[in-house]
Amino acid sequence: MPRLRRTALSLCLSCKPEEVILPKTLNVADVMPGDVLLCRSDYSGASVTEVTGSKYVHAAICVRQGYAAEASGHRVKEIEIEKLLNEYDHIAVLRQPDCWSPRRVNKLQSFIDAAISRKAGFNCDGMRTFEERKKAHEENLMDKLREFFEQTPVDPAVDCKSYFCSELVAAAHVAVGIIEPSAAVVYEPSTLSPSDLADDFTFGIFCGYLIPYSGYIIPEDDEYSAAPRLDEIFENKT
């Protein structure tokens, strides 16, 4: 199953050479349940940047107005989005339009509540072995798909003892049914980094930034500084 990358969509949008698109900023109140929050830091998370090449070093998911769920520190928890923003330089918000029905939002909250209730921890081992596991997953993917379709399909196991940040976000998409069982073979949560979420429209299209204060300047090297926004994409289609 090929992944859609935002670079491909960029080629579909016509922009005049002289046109300057200013970064769109959002308020915390604009963030909706199901939105993926990618957190950038130029000064922390160097080990993540070294592996992925991205300065987006953390991922969380909005569960309800003003609150996100994350795997951070020692556990899975809910955090006020304002507090999350204070811990990073800025946040890029990804949104998957028309996917997050009230039923799926409720399933998302139930998934997070269950993880917190069973005291799901932070997957340190998963972080440490990420590169090796991702490589093995990609090398064995066709065998995994063949095995899936030759056997009686079963629901993916997403109720884990621990998660790292992007693993939790991806597992949530499996738990609510946005990623179906066959696709979950490809989108194995423990093999996805924050930059993998950023590069795949399954997890949403960029719709704007949360910035820490008025006048904050988005760095020129930011992955989304020239990316088409969700509102521009739909405006371009009309």
Image: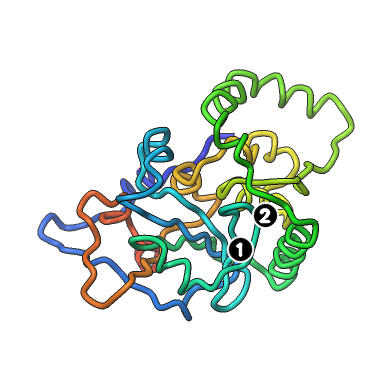
Residue furthest to the left: 18
Residue pictured at 24% horizontal, 69% vertical: 216
Position of 194 relative to 17 (above/below)? above
Q: Residues within 10 Å of mark 1 (few under 14, many from 20)?
A: many
Position of 156 relative to 65 (above/below)? above
Q: Which element type, helix, strand or loop, lies under badge 1?
A: strand
Among the 4 quarters of the image, the one containing residue 150: top right
Is the Cβ of the residue at disc 2 closer than 8 Å to that at disc 1?
yes
Q: Position of residue 136 (x, y in %)?
A: 60, 21
Q: Residues within 10 Å of mark 2 (few under 14, many from 20)?
A: many
| Residue at image mark 1 | 69
Relative to residue 31, is residue 15 drawn left or right? left
| Residue at image mark 2 | 172
Viewer-closest of 145 and 44? 44
Q: Tell me the quarter of the image containing the C terminus.
A: bottom left
Q: Tell me the quarter of the image containing the N terminus.
A: top right
Q: Nearer the viewer, mark 2 or mark 1?
A: 1
Q: Mark 1: which amino acid?
A: Ala
Q: Position of residue 19 (x, y in %)?
A: 15, 62
Q: Position of residue 208 (x, y in %)?
A: 37, 66
Measured in 3D between alpha carbons, the distance from the residue under mark 2 to the one under mark 1, in whole angstroms, is 10 Å
Question: Closer to the N terminus: mark 2 or mark 1?
Answer: 1
Position of 11 relative to 235 (above/below)? above
Among the 4 quarters of the image, the one containing residue 186: top right
Residue pictured at 62% horizontal, 34% vertical: 125
Residue furthest to the bottom: 29
Q: Which element type, helix, strand or loop, lies under badge 2?
A: helix
Viewer-closest of 137 and 81? 81
